[in-house]
Protein backbone atom coordinates (compact mmCIF):
# COMPACT_ATOMS: atom_id res chain seq x y z
CA UNK A 1 0.00 0.00 0.00
CA UNK A 2 1.23 3.47 -0.86
CA UNK A 3 0.50 6.76 0.88
CA UNK A 4 -2.59 7.50 -1.23
CA UNK A 5 -4.15 4.13 -0.44
CA UNK A 6 -3.48 4.53 3.26
CA UNK A 7 -4.96 8.04 3.24
CA UNK A 8 -8.10 6.81 1.46
CA UNK A 9 -8.53 3.91 3.90
CA UNK A 10 -8.02 5.94 7.08
CA UNK A 11 -10.01 8.92 5.80
CA UNK A 12 -13.10 6.92 4.83
CA UNK A 13 -13.17 4.83 8.01
CA UNK A 14 -12.64 7.89 10.22
CA UNK A 15 -15.35 9.89 8.43
CA UNK A 16 -17.94 7.13 8.72
CA UNK A 17 -17.09 6.49 12.36
CA UNK A 18 -17.33 10.11 13.49
CA UNK A 19 -20.41 10.78 11.36
CA UNK A 20 -22.31 7.92 12.98
CA UNK A 21 -21.46 9.11 16.48
CA UNK A 22 -22.24 12.73 15.58
CA UNK A 23 -25.67 11.90 14.16
CA UNK A 24 -26.57 9.76 17.16
CA UNK A 25 -25.59 12.43 19.71
CA UNK A 26 -26.52 15.57 17.73
CA UNK A 27 -28.81 17.97 19.48
CA UNK A 28 -29.33 15.87 22.58
CA UNK A 29 -27.52 14.28 25.45
CA UNK A 30 -26.83 10.59 25.44
CA UNK A 31 -29.89 8.38 25.46
CA UNK A 32 -31.15 7.67 28.93
CA UNK A 33 -33.63 5.04 27.81
CA UNK A 34 -32.49 1.48 27.43
CA UNK A 35 -34.98 1.04 24.59
CA UNK A 36 -33.38 3.93 22.68
CA UNK A 37 -29.90 2.56 23.25
CA UNK A 38 -30.94 -0.88 22.05
CA UNK A 39 -33.23 0.15 19.19
CA UNK A 40 -32.64 3.74 18.17
CA UNK A 41 -35.44 6.12 17.19
CA UNK A 42 -36.29 8.64 14.47
CA UNK A 43 -34.09 7.08 11.81
CA UNK A 44 -34.85 7.68 8.13
CA UNK A 45 -36.25 4.93 5.91
CA UNK A 46 -33.22 4.95 3.63
CA UNK A 47 -30.75 4.76 6.52
CA UNK A 48 -32.60 1.86 8.12
CA UNK A 49 -32.96 0.01 4.81
CA UNK A 50 -29.25 0.33 4.12
CA UNK A 51 -28.52 -0.71 7.70
CA UNK A 52 -30.70 -3.84 7.43
CA UNK A 53 -29.02 -4.77 4.16
CA UNK A 54 -25.56 -4.29 5.63
CA UNK A 55 -26.38 -6.35 8.73
CA UNK A 56 -25.73 -9.60 6.84
CA UNK A 57 -23.65 -8.07 4.04
CA UNK A 58 -20.40 -8.60 5.88
CA UNK A 59 -16.85 -8.94 4.66
CA UNK A 60 -17.67 -12.64 4.44
CA UNK A 61 -20.07 -12.05 1.55
CA UNK A 62 -17.84 -9.41 -0.04
CA UNK A 63 -14.92 -11.82 -0.20
CA UNK A 64 -16.94 -15.02 -0.48
CA UNK A 65 -19.49 -14.36 -3.23
CA UNK A 66 -17.00 -13.47 -6.02
CA UNK A 67 -14.86 -16.47 -5.06
CA UNK A 68 -17.95 -18.69 -5.04
CA UNK A 69 -18.83 -17.58 -8.59
CA UNK A 70 -15.25 -18.20 -9.73
CA UNK A 71 -15.04 -21.72 -8.32
CA UNK A 72 -18.66 -22.93 -8.51
CA UNK A 73 -20.50 -20.85 -11.11
CA UNK A 74 -23.45 -18.46 -11.06
CA UNK A 75 -26.20 -20.62 -9.55
CA UNK A 76 -26.28 -18.36 -6.48
CA UNK A 77 -27.85 -15.69 -8.70
CA UNK A 78 -31.14 -17.52 -8.09
CA UNK A 79 -31.23 -15.69 -4.78
CA UNK A 80 -32.29 -12.63 -6.81
CA UNK A 81 -35.81 -13.89 -7.67
CA UNK A 82 -36.16 -15.18 -4.13
CA UNK A 83 -35.69 -11.64 -2.80
CA UNK A 84 -38.83 -10.65 -4.71
CA UNK A 85 -40.74 -13.52 -3.08
CA UNK A 86 -39.34 -13.44 0.45
CA UNK A 87 -39.19 -9.76 1.42
CA UNK A 88 -42.92 -9.10 0.76
CA UNK A 89 -43.68 -12.08 3.00
CA UNK A 90 -41.59 -10.46 5.72
CA UNK A 91 -43.21 -7.04 5.24
CA UNK A 92 -46.85 -8.09 5.15
CA UNK A 93 -47.09 -11.32 7.14
CA UNK A 94 -44.45 -11.23 9.89
CA UNK A 95 -43.65 -7.55 10.45
CA UNK A 96 -47.21 -6.32 11.32
CA UNK A 97 -47.34 -8.79 14.21
CA UNK A 98 -43.99 -7.75 15.66
CA UNK A 99 -44.49 -4.04 15.11
CA UNK A 100 -47.86 -4.04 16.86
CA UNK A 101 -46.34 -5.60 19.97
CA UNK A 102 -43.36 -3.15 20.12
CA UNK A 103 -41.04 -5.68 21.72
CA UNK A 104 -37.44 -4.90 22.66
CA UNK A 105 -36.53 -8.54 22.03
CA UNK A 106 -38.45 -10.25 19.26
CA UNK A 107 -38.16 -13.55 21.13
CA UNK A 108 -40.48 -12.22 23.82
CA UNK A 109 -43.21 -13.00 21.29
CA UNK A 110 -42.63 -16.71 21.81
CA UNK A 111 -43.35 -16.39 25.53
CA UNK A 112 -46.50 -14.35 24.89
CA UNK A 113 -47.68 -16.90 22.35
CA UNK A 114 -46.37 -20.14 23.87
CA UNK A 115 -44.22 -20.27 27.00
CA UNK A 116 -40.91 -19.17 28.45
CA UNK A 117 -39.20 -22.36 27.28
CA UNK A 118 -39.71 -21.47 23.61
CA UNK A 119 -38.46 -17.94 24.23
CA UNK A 120 -35.38 -19.02 26.14
CA UNK A 121 -34.45 -21.66 23.57
CA UNK A 122 -34.75 -19.16 20.71
CA UNK A 123 -32.74 -16.55 22.60
CA UNK A 124 -29.90 -18.93 23.39
CA UNK A 125 -29.92 -20.21 19.80
CA UNK A 126 -29.71 -16.64 18.52
CA UNK A 127 -26.79 -15.84 20.83
CA UNK A 128 -24.88 -18.92 19.68
CA UNK A 129 -25.67 -18.17 16.04
CA UNK A 130 -24.61 -14.53 16.26
CA UNK A 131 -21.41 -15.18 18.20
CA UNK A 132 -20.35 -17.84 15.69
CA UNK A 133 -21.21 -15.58 12.76
CA UNK A 134 -19.47 -12.47 14.04
CA UNK A 135 -16.34 -14.49 14.69
CA UNK A 136 -16.25 -15.26 10.95
CA UNK A 137 -17.31 -11.70 10.07
CA UNK A 138 -14.48 -10.36 12.23
CA UNK A 139 -11.88 -12.72 10.82
CA UNK A 140 -12.67 -11.88 7.16
CA UNK A 141 -11.67 -8.17 7.12
CA UNK A 142 -8.72 -8.89 9.39
CA UNK A 143 -7.53 -11.50 6.90
CA UNK A 144 -7.78 -9.05 3.99
CA UNK A 145 -6.01 -6.28 5.88
CA UNK A 146 -3.19 -8.53 6.99
CA UNK A 147 -2.74 -9.90 3.46
CA UNK A 148 -2.77 -6.56 1.61
CA UNK A 149 -1.63 -3.95 4.11
CA UNK A 150 0.84 -6.18 5.98
CA UNK A 151 -0.97 -5.39 9.24
CA UNK A 152 -0.58 -8.18 11.82
CA UNK A 153 -3.72 -10.29 12.02
CA UNK A 154 -3.97 -9.90 15.79
CA UNK A 155 -3.89 -6.09 15.61
CA UNK A 156 -6.44 -6.01 12.81
CA UNK A 157 -8.83 -8.22 14.79
CA UNK A 158 -8.48 -6.10 17.92
CA UNK A 159 -9.02 -2.78 16.13
CA UNK A 160 -12.01 -4.00 14.11
CA UNK A 161 -13.83 -5.51 17.08
CA UNK A 162 -13.04 -2.58 19.38
CA UNK A 163 -14.21 0.08 16.94
CA UNK A 164 -17.50 -1.75 16.34
CA UNK A 165 -18.15 -2.06 20.07
CA UNK A 166 -17.38 1.65 20.47
CA UNK A 167 -20.18 2.62 18.07
CA UNK A 168 -22.82 0.81 20.08
CA UNK A 169 -21.42 1.57 23.55
CA UNK A 170 -21.14 5.32 22.99
CA UNK A 171 -23.85 6.06 20.46
CA UNK A 172 -26.25 3.20 21.01
CA UNK A 173 -28.14 1.46 18.21
CA UNK A 174 -28.79 4.78 16.50
CA UNK A 175 -25.05 5.27 15.91
CA UNK A 176 -24.88 1.71 14.61
CA UNK A 177 -27.72 2.36 12.15
CA UNK A 178 -26.24 5.58 10.77
CA UNK A 179 -22.78 4.02 10.59
CA UNK A 180 -24.10 0.87 8.91
CA UNK A 181 -26.04 2.86 6.32
CA UNK A 182 -22.95 4.87 5.36
CA UNK A 183 -20.87 1.72 5.27
CA UNK A 184 -23.43 0.08 2.99
CA UNK A 185 -23.30 3.07 0.64
CA UNK A 186 -19.50 2.83 0.63
CA UNK A 187 -19.68 -0.88 -0.19
CA UNK A 188 -22.00 -0.26 -3.15
CA UNK A 189 -19.84 2.57 -4.49
CA UNK A 190 -16.57 0.68 -3.97
CA UNK A 191 -17.76 -2.50 -5.62
CA UNK A 192 -19.16 -0.53 -8.56
CA UNK A 193 -15.87 1.34 -9.02
CA UNK A 194 -13.87 -1.90 -8.86
CA UNK A 195 -16.28 -3.53 -11.31
CA UNK A 196 -15.91 -0.79 -13.93
CA UNK A 197 -12.14 -0.53 -13.49
CA UNK A 198 -11.87 -4.30 -13.87
CA UNK A 199 -13.80 -4.04 -17.14
CA UNK A 200 -11.20 -1.59 -18.49
CA UNK A 201 -9.71 -3.00 -21.69
CA UNK A 202 -12.28 -5.75 -22.07
CA UNK A 203 -15.97 -5.99 -22.89
CA UNK A 204 -19.05 -7.50 -21.34
CA UNK A 205 -19.37 -9.97 -24.22
CA UNK A 206 -15.80 -11.20 -23.63
CA UNK A 207 -16.54 -11.81 -19.96
CA UNK A 208 -19.74 -13.72 -20.77
CA UNK A 209 -18.03 -15.71 -23.53
CA UNK A 210 -15.20 -16.75 -21.23
CA UNK A 211 -17.64 -17.72 -18.49
CA UNK A 212 -19.71 -19.77 -20.92
CA UNK A 213 -16.67 -21.61 -22.27
CA UNK A 214 -15.48 -22.36 -18.76
CA UNK A 215 -18.88 -23.57 -17.60
CA UNK A 216 -19.36 -20.73 -15.11
CA UNK A 217 -22.75 -19.65 -16.47
CA UNK A 218 -24.79 -22.09 -14.41
CA UNK A 219 -28.47 -21.12 -14.32
CA UNK A 220 -30.41 -24.24 -15.26
CA UNK A 221 -29.38 -26.98 -12.86
CA UNK A 222 -32.80 -28.56 -12.24
CA UNK A 223 -31.50 -31.78 -10.68
CA UNK A 224 -33.76 -32.70 -7.78
CA UNK A 225 -31.12 -34.61 -5.80
CA UNK A 226 -30.93 -32.86 -2.39
CA UNK A 227 -27.19 -33.56 -2.33
CA UNK A 228 -26.70 -31.04 -5.15
CA UNK A 229 -25.13 -28.11 -3.36
CA UNK A 230 -26.64 -25.37 -5.54
CA UNK A 231 -29.57 -26.42 -7.73
CA UNK A 232 -32.59 -24.38 -8.76
CA UNK A 233 -34.63 -26.21 -6.12
CA UNK A 234 -32.15 -25.85 -3.28
CA UNK A 235 -31.79 -22.12 -3.95
CA UNK A 236 -35.49 -21.40 -4.53
CA UNK A 237 -36.78 -23.46 -1.62
CA UNK A 238 -33.83 -23.31 0.73
CA UNK A 239 -32.99 -19.73 -0.25
CA UNK A 240 -36.47 -18.57 0.69
CA UNK A 241 -36.12 -20.24 4.07
CA UNK A 242 -32.72 -18.65 4.63
CA UNK A 243 -33.97 -15.17 3.74
CA UNK A 244 -36.99 -15.51 6.03
CA UNK A 245 -34.85 -16.77 8.90
CA UNK A 246 -32.55 -13.75 8.55
CA UNK A 247 -35.07 -10.97 7.92
CA UNK A 248 -38.28 -12.23 9.59
CA UNK A 249 -37.09 -14.12 12.66
CA UNK A 250 -33.80 -12.52 13.65
CA UNK A 251 -33.29 -9.88 16.32
CA UNK A 252 -30.62 -8.16 14.24
CA UNK A 253 -33.16 -7.28 11.51
CA UNK A 254 -36.28 -6.81 13.63
CA UNK A 255 -34.42 -4.33 15.82
CA UNK A 256 -33.90 -2.12 12.75
CA UNK A 257 -37.59 -2.29 11.82
CA UNK A 258 -38.64 -1.27 15.32
CA UNK A 259 -36.64 1.97 15.01
CA UNK A 260 -39.16 3.27 12.45
CA UNK A 261 -42.01 5.60 13.53
CA UNK A 262 -44.79 3.68 11.75
CA UNK A 263 -45.59 0.25 10.35
CA UNK A 264 -45.73 1.62 6.81
CA UNK A 265 -42.23 3.07 7.05
CA UNK A 266 -40.95 -0.19 8.55
CA UNK A 267 -42.48 -2.10 5.63
CA UNK A 268 -40.73 0.25 3.20
CA UNK A 269 -37.46 -0.55 4.96
CA UNK A 270 -38.05 -4.23 4.23
CA UNK A 271 -39.14 -3.74 0.62
CA UNK A 272 -36.21 -1.48 -0.23
CA UNK A 273 -33.97 -4.41 0.57
CA UNK A 274 -35.16 -6.08 -2.65
CA UNK A 275 -33.31 -3.67 -4.99
CA UNK A 276 -30.41 -3.18 -2.58
CA UNK A 277 -29.72 -6.90 -2.20
CA UNK A 278 -30.30 -7.58 -5.88
CA UNK A 279 -27.89 -4.80 -6.87
CA UNK A 280 -25.10 -6.03 -4.64
CA UNK A 281 -25.70 -9.65 -5.70
CA UNK A 282 -25.45 -8.64 -9.36
CA UNK A 283 -22.22 -6.79 -8.64
CA UNK A 284 -20.78 -9.83 -6.87
CA UNK A 285 -21.70 -12.13 -9.76
CA UNK A 286 -20.18 -9.70 -12.27
CA UNK A 287 -16.94 -9.46 -10.29
CA UNK A 288 -16.79 -13.24 -9.95
CA UNK A 289 -17.06 -13.64 -13.74
CA UNK A 290 -14.36 -11.00 -14.22
CA UNK A 291 -12.13 -12.98 -11.86
CA UNK A 292 -12.66 -16.06 -13.99
CA UNK A 293 -11.81 -14.22 -17.20
CA UNK A 294 -8.61 -12.96 -15.60
CA UNK A 295 -7.44 -16.39 -14.41
CA UNK A 296 -9.19 -18.81 -16.76
CA UNK A 297 -5.87 -19.98 -18.25
CA UNK A 298 -3.80 -19.67 -15.09
CA UNK A 299 -5.58 -20.36 -11.83
CA UNK A 300 -3.67 -18.97 -8.84
CA UNK A 301 -3.61 -21.80 -6.34
CA UNK A 302 -4.94 -20.16 -3.19
CA UNK A 303 -4.45 -21.78 0.20
CA UNK A 304 -7.58 -19.91 1.32
CA UNK A 305 -9.98 -19.41 -1.58
CA UNK A 306 -11.51 -16.36 0.07
CA UNK A 307 -8.27 -14.49 -0.69
CA UNK A 308 -8.85 -14.63 -4.45
CA UNK A 309 -10.62 -11.26 -4.71
CA UNK A 310 -7.95 -9.34 -2.72
CA UNK A 311 -5.28 -11.11 -4.78
CA UNK A 312 -6.95 -9.88 -7.99
CA UNK A 313 -7.20 -6.30 -6.75
CA UNK A 314 -3.52 -6.16 -5.82
CA UNK A 315 -2.26 -7.94 -8.93
CA UNK A 316 -4.49 -6.49 -11.66
CA UNK A 317 -5.86 -3.05 -10.73
CA UNK A 318 -3.59 -1.70 -7.99
CA UNK A 319 -2.04 0.74 -10.51
CA UNK A 320 -5.09 2.99 -10.10
CA UNK A 321 -4.30 5.46 -7.27
CA UNK A 322 -6.30 4.83 -4.13
CA UNK A 323 -8.08 1.71 -5.40
CA UNK A 324 -6.51 -0.59 -2.79
CA UNK A 325 -7.44 1.86 -0.04
CA UNK A 326 -11.01 2.00 -1.37
CA UNK A 327 -11.20 -1.79 -1.52
CA UNK A 328 -9.92 -2.22 2.01
CA UNK A 329 -12.29 0.48 3.25
CA UNK A 330 -15.20 -1.45 1.71
CA UNK A 331 -14.10 -4.71 3.34
CA UNK A 332 -13.51 -3.00 6.65
CA UNK A 333 -16.87 -1.22 6.46
CA UNK A 334 -18.64 -4.49 5.69
CA UNK A 335 -17.09 -6.04 8.78
CA UNK A 336 -17.81 -3.05 11.01
CA UNK A 337 -21.46 -2.80 9.96
CA UNK A 338 -22.12 -6.44 10.74
CA UNK A 339 -20.29 -6.35 14.05
CA UNK A 340 -21.95 -3.16 15.33
CA UNK A 341 -25.42 -4.44 14.41
CA UNK A 342 -24.69 -7.82 15.99
CA UNK A 343 -23.37 -6.35 19.24
CA UNK A 344 -26.49 -4.20 19.56
CA UNK A 345 -28.84 -7.11 18.85
CA UNK A 346 -27.03 -9.39 21.28
CA UNK A 347 -27.28 -6.73 23.96
CA UNK A 348 -31.04 -6.45 23.50
CA UNK A 349 -31.55 -10.21 23.69
CA UNK A 350 -29.30 -10.75 26.72
CA UNK A 351 -30.91 -7.90 28.69
CA UNK A 352 -34.53 -8.74 27.85
CA UNK A 353 -34.45 -12.53 27.59
CA UNK A 354 -31.73 -13.52 30.04
CA UNK A 355 -31.02 -10.90 32.71
CA UNK A 356 -34.55 -9.53 33.18
CA UNK A 357 -36.13 -12.97 33.04
CA UNK A 358 -33.61 -14.38 35.50
CA UNK A 359 -34.32 -11.58 37.97
CA UNK A 360 -38.09 -11.96 37.67
CA UNK A 361 -38.14 -15.72 38.06
CA UNK A 362 -35.38 -16.14 40.63
CA UNK A 363 -36.10 -13.09 42.80
CA UNK A 364 -39.91 -13.02 42.90
CA UNK A 365 -40.64 -10.51 40.18
CA UNK A 366 -37.72 -8.13 40.79
CA UNK A 367 -37.42 -5.62 37.92
CA UNK A 368 -34.21 -4.36 36.36
CA UNK A 369 -33.96 -0.60 36.91
CA UNK A 370 -33.93 1.57 33.80
CA UNK A 371 -30.61 3.23 34.57
CA UNK A 372 -29.02 -0.16 35.20
CA UNK A 373 -30.37 -1.39 31.86
CA UNK A 374 -28.77 1.59 30.10
CA UNK A 375 -25.42 0.82 31.70
CA UNK A 376 -25.70 -2.83 30.67
CA UNK A 377 -26.65 -1.83 27.12
CA UNK A 378 -23.43 0.15 26.89
CA UNK A 379 -21.17 -2.41 28.59
CA UNK A 380 -22.39 -5.63 26.96
CA UNK A 381 -20.93 -4.77 23.51
CA UNK A 382 -17.51 -4.73 25.15
CA UNK A 383 -18.14 -8.22 26.54
CA UNK A 384 -19.25 -9.50 23.14
CA UNK A 385 -16.24 -7.80 21.60
CA UNK A 386 -13.94 -9.86 23.82
CA UNK A 387 -15.76 -13.11 23.03
CA UNK A 388 -15.73 -12.46 19.28
CA UNK A 389 -12.00 -11.75 19.35
CA UNK A 390 -11.35 -15.09 21.04
CA UNK A 391 -13.54 -16.95 18.54
CA UNK A 392 -12.10 -15.14 15.51
CA UNK A 393 -8.67 -16.68 16.02
CA UNK A 394 -10.19 -20.16 15.72
CA UNK A 395 -11.35 -19.34 12.17
CA UNK A 396 -7.80 -19.67 10.86
CA UNK A 397 -8.09 -23.47 10.99
CA UNK A 398 -11.29 -23.63 8.90
CA UNK A 399 -11.08 -25.46 5.56
CA UNK A 400 -14.48 -24.53 4.12
CA UNK A 401 -15.07 -21.18 2.42
CA UNK A 402 -16.33 -18.56 4.85
CA UNK A 403 -19.49 -17.87 2.82
CA UNK A 404 -20.72 -21.45 3.17
CA UNK A 405 -19.85 -21.47 6.87
CA UNK A 406 -21.92 -18.32 7.41
CA UNK A 407 -24.94 -19.60 5.45
CA UNK A 408 -24.71 -22.89 7.32
CA UNK A 409 -24.81 -21.05 10.65
CA UNK A 410 -27.87 -19.09 9.49
CA UNK A 411 -29.71 -22.21 8.37
CA UNK A 412 -28.88 -24.44 11.33
CA UNK A 413 -29.67 -21.87 14.02
CA UNK A 414 -32.17 -19.67 12.19
CA UNK A 415 -34.33 -22.44 10.76
CA UNK A 416 -35.64 -23.78 14.11
CA UNK A 417 -36.31 -20.24 15.35
CA UNK A 418 -38.19 -19.44 12.13
CA UNK A 419 -40.25 -22.60 12.62
CA UNK A 420 -41.25 -21.46 16.12
CA UNK A 421 -42.44 -18.09 14.80
CA UNK A 422 -44.34 -19.75 11.94
CA UNK A 423 -46.10 -22.04 14.42
CA UNK A 424 -47.10 -19.04 16.51
CA UNK A 425 -48.18 -16.66 13.74
CA UNK A 426 -49.93 -19.04 11.31
CA UNK A 427 -51.24 -21.93 13.44
CA UNK A 428 -53.54 -20.62 16.21
CA UNK A 429 -54.42 -24.09 17.49
CA UNK A 430 -50.77 -24.94 18.30
CA UNK A 431 -50.05 -24.38 21.99
CA UNK A 432 -46.93 -24.12 24.13
CA UNK A 433 -45.94 -27.74 24.78
CA UNK A 434 -46.40 -28.76 21.16
CA UNK A 435 -44.44 -25.76 19.87
CA UNK A 436 -41.61 -26.41 22.30
CA UNK A 437 -41.33 -30.04 21.22
CA UNK A 438 -41.29 -29.10 17.53
CA UNK A 439 -38.72 -26.35 18.04
CA UNK A 440 -36.46 -28.51 20.20
CA UNK A 441 -36.42 -31.50 17.85
CA UNK A 442 -35.86 -29.26 14.81
CA UNK A 443 -32.88 -27.65 16.54
CA UNK A 444 -31.36 -31.02 17.41
CA UNK A 445 -31.89 -32.40 13.90
CA UNK A 446 -30.32 -29.39 12.19
CA UNK A 447 -27.29 -29.32 14.46
CA UNK A 448 -26.88 -33.09 14.04
CA UNK A 449 -26.86 -32.89 10.23
CA UNK A 450 -24.54 -29.89 10.10
CA UNK A 451 -22.22 -31.37 12.70
CA UNK A 452 -22.13 -34.65 10.82
CA UNK A 453 -21.18 -32.82 7.63
CA UNK A 454 -18.25 -31.21 9.43
CA UNK A 455 -17.07 -34.46 11.03
CA UNK A 456 -17.38 -36.33 7.72
CA UNK A 457 -15.40 -33.60 5.92
CA UNK A 458 -18.06 -33.06 3.28
CA UNK A 459 -16.58 -31.19 0.29
CA UNK A 460 -18.25 -29.94 -2.92
CA UNK A 461 -17.19 -30.99 -6.41
CA UNK A 462 -16.09 -27.81 -8.16
CA UNK A 463 -15.83 -26.63 -11.75
CA UNK A 464 -12.63 -27.14 -13.78
CA UNK A 465 -9.58 -24.95 -13.18
CA UNK A 466 -6.70 -24.55 -15.63
CA UNK A 467 -3.39 -24.74 -13.79
CA UNK A 468 -1.12 -25.42 -16.77
CA UNK A 469 0.74 -22.12 -16.45
CA UNK A 470 3.32 -23.25 -13.96
CA UNK A 471 1.39 -23.32 -10.68
CA UNK A 472 0.73 -27.03 -11.06
CA UNK A 473 -0.72 -29.65 -13.35
CA UNK A 474 -3.76 -28.92 -15.46
CA UNK A 475 -6.94 -30.05 -13.78
CA UNK A 476 -8.77 -32.45 -16.07
CA UNK A 477 -12.48 -32.28 -15.49
CA UNK A 478 -15.54 -32.72 -17.67
CA UNK A 479 -17.91 -29.76 -17.29
CA UNK A 480 -20.82 -32.11 -17.99
CA UNK A 481 -19.73 -34.52 -15.26
CA UNK A 482 -22.95 -35.41 -13.36
CA UNK A 483 -21.10 -35.26 -10.06
CA UNK A 484 -20.50 -31.50 -10.43
CA UNK A 485 -22.15 -29.55 -7.66
CA UNK A 486 -22.59 -32.57 -5.42
CA UNK A 487 -20.89 -32.84 -2.07
CA UNK A 488 -18.65 -35.78 -1.26
CA UNK A 489 -17.20 -37.00 2.02
CA UNK A 490 -13.58 -37.81 2.59
CA UNK A 491 -14.56 -40.80 4.74
CA UNK A 492 -16.84 -43.83 4.31
CA UNK A 493 -20.01 -43.16 2.35
CA UNK A 494 -22.53 -44.90 4.65
CA UNK A 495 -26.27 -44.22 4.65
CA UNK A 496 -25.82 -41.76 7.51
CA UNK A 497 -23.18 -39.87 5.55
CA UNK A 498 -25.71 -39.62 2.72
CA UNK A 499 -27.88 -37.61 5.12
CA UNK A 500 -24.94 -35.38 5.97
CA UNK A 501 -24.42 -34.71 2.25
CA UNK A 502 -27.71 -32.80 1.99
CA UNK A 503 -27.09 -29.29 0.69
CA UNK A 504 -26.57 -26.70 3.41
CA UNK A 505 -29.16 -24.54 1.64
CA UNK A 506 -31.90 -26.90 2.87
CA UNK A 507 -31.14 -26.63 6.59
CA UNK A 508 -33.78 -23.99 7.35
CA UNK A 509 -36.40 -25.89 5.35
CA UNK A 510 -35.52 -29.13 7.13
CA UNK A 511 -36.22 -27.34 10.40
CA UNK A 512 -39.67 -26.29 9.15
CA UNK A 513 -40.45 -29.78 7.83
CA UNK A 514 -39.53 -31.29 11.20
CA UNK A 515 -41.04 -28.72 13.57
CA UNK A 516 -44.44 -28.06 11.99
CA UNK A 517 -45.68 -31.67 11.53
CA UNK A 518 -44.21 -32.74 14.87
CA UNK A 519 -45.88 -29.83 16.65
CA UNK A 520 -49.22 -30.81 15.12
CA UNK A 521 -48.80 -34.40 16.29
CA UNK A 522 -47.83 -33.24 19.78
CA UNK A 523 -50.83 -30.90 19.85
CA UNK A 524 -53.18 -33.77 19.04
CA UNK A 525 -51.78 -35.66 22.02
CA UNK A 526 -52.07 -32.69 24.43
CA UNK A 527 -55.16 -30.88 23.08
CA UNK A 528 -57.36 -31.53 26.11
CA UNK A 529 -54.91 -29.87 28.50
CA UNK A 530 -54.10 -26.65 26.60
CA UNK A 531 -57.44 -25.14 25.59
CA UNK A 532 -56.50 -21.47 26.12
CA UNK A 533 -57.78 -18.60 23.91
CA UNK A 534 -55.15 -16.81 21.80
CA UNK A 535 -54.76 -13.03 21.63
CA UNK A 536 -55.44 -12.00 18.02
CA UNK A 537 -52.49 -9.55 18.15
CA UNK A 538 -50.19 -12.57 18.20
CA UNK A 539 -51.54 -13.95 14.92
CA UNK A 540 -51.16 -13.03 11.27
CA UNK A 541 -53.97 -10.78 10.00
CA UNK A 542 -54.93 -13.37 7.37
CA UNK A 543 -55.35 -16.01 10.08
CA UNK A 544 -57.46 -13.64 12.20
CA UNK A 545 -59.76 -12.88 9.26
CA UNK A 546 -60.10 -16.58 8.53
CA UNK A 547 -61.04 -17.24 12.16
CA UNK A 548 -63.69 -14.50 12.07
CA UNK A 549 -65.21 -15.90 8.89
CA UNK A 550 -65.36 -19.36 10.42
CA UNK A 551 -66.98 -17.96 13.58
CA UNK A 552 -69.56 -16.07 11.53
CA UNK A 553 -70.37 -19.17 9.51
CA UNK A 554 -70.68 -21.21 12.71
CA UNK A 555 -73.05 -18.65 14.25
CA UNK A 556 -75.13 -18.57 11.07
CA UNK A 557 -75.44 -22.34 11.02
CA UNK A 558 -76.52 -22.52 14.68
CA UNK A 559 -79.05 -19.66 14.52
CA UNK A 560 -80.72 -20.56 11.19
CA UNK A 561 -84.34 -21.79 11.82
CA UNK A 562 -85.08 -25.38 10.94
CA UNK A 563 -87.81 -25.54 8.33
CA UNK A 564 -90.72 -27.94 8.85
CA UNK A 565 -91.58 -30.63 6.39
CA UNK A 566 -94.54 -28.62 5.08
CA UNK A 567 -92.36 -25.58 4.56
CA UNK A 568 -90.05 -27.66 2.42
CA UNK A 569 -92.96 -28.77 0.22
CA UNK A 570 -91.94 -28.00 -3.40
CA UNK A 571 -95.49 -26.98 -4.34
CA UNK A 572 -95.67 -24.38 -1.57
CA UNK A 573 -92.30 -22.99 -2.58
CA UNK A 574 -93.51 -22.61 -6.18
CA UNK A 575 -96.77 -20.99 -5.05
CA UNK A 576 -94.94 -18.52 -2.83
CA UNK A 577 -92.82 -17.46 -5.77
CA UNK A 578 -95.95 -16.17 -7.49
Image (tube, rainbow, N blue to C red):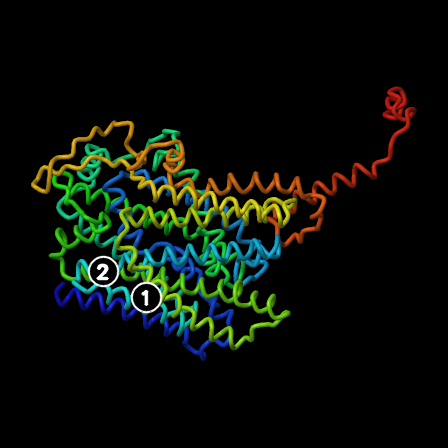
Neighbour tally class for label 1: few under 14, some 14-19, many 20 plus, Cα within 10 Å: many
In the figure, residue 460 lies in which quadrant?
A: top left
Q: Position of residue 36 (x, y in %)?
A: 49, 70
In the drawing, does residue 105 fall left or right of residue 216?
right
Viewer-proximal residue among 199 and 102: 102
Q: Callout 2: helix, strand or loop?
A: helix
Cα gap from disc 1 to disc 2, whole angstroms: 16 Å
Q: Is residue 452 left or right of residue 152?
A: right
Mark 1 vs mark 2: which is more N-terminal?
Answer: 1
Residue found farthest to the right: 566
Identify the residue at the far bottom of this view: 29
Residue sitting nearer the eye, 34 or 180: 34
362 or 123: nearer the viewer: 362
Query: For the N terminus, which image quadrant?
Result: bottom left
The residue to which callout 2 is attached is 328
**Left or right placement of residue 570 versus residue 210 in this view:** right
Residue 489 drawn at (x, y percent):
31, 36
Q: Residue at x 88, y 30 (%)?
A: 563
Kindly identify which residue carries mark 1. Answer: 161
Q: Could you tell me residue 68's position as x and y percent?
A: 27, 44
Above or below residue 376? Residue 520 is: above
- Between circles 1 and 2, the one closer to the viewer is 1
- Identity of the residue drawn at 34% across and 43% down: 455
**What residue do we see at 58% from left, 49% from top?**
436
Q: Quadrant of the C terminus?
A: top right
Amino acid sequence: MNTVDMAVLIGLIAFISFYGLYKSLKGSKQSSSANEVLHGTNVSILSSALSVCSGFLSAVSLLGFPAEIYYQGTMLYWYGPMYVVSFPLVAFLFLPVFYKLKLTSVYEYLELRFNFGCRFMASITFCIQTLLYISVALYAPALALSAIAAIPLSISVLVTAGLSALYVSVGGAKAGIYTSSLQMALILISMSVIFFISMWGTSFSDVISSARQGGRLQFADFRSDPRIRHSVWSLMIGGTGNILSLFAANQLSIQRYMAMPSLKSAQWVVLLNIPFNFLILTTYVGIGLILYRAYRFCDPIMQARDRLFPYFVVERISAFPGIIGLFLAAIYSAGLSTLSASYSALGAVVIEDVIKQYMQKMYSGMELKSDHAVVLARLLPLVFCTLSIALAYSCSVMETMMLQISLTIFGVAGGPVLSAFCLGIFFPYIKGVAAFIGQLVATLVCFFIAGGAVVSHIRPVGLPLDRSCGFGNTTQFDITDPSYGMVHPLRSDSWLVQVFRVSYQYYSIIALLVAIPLAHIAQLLTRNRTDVPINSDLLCALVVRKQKREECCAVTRTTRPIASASENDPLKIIDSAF
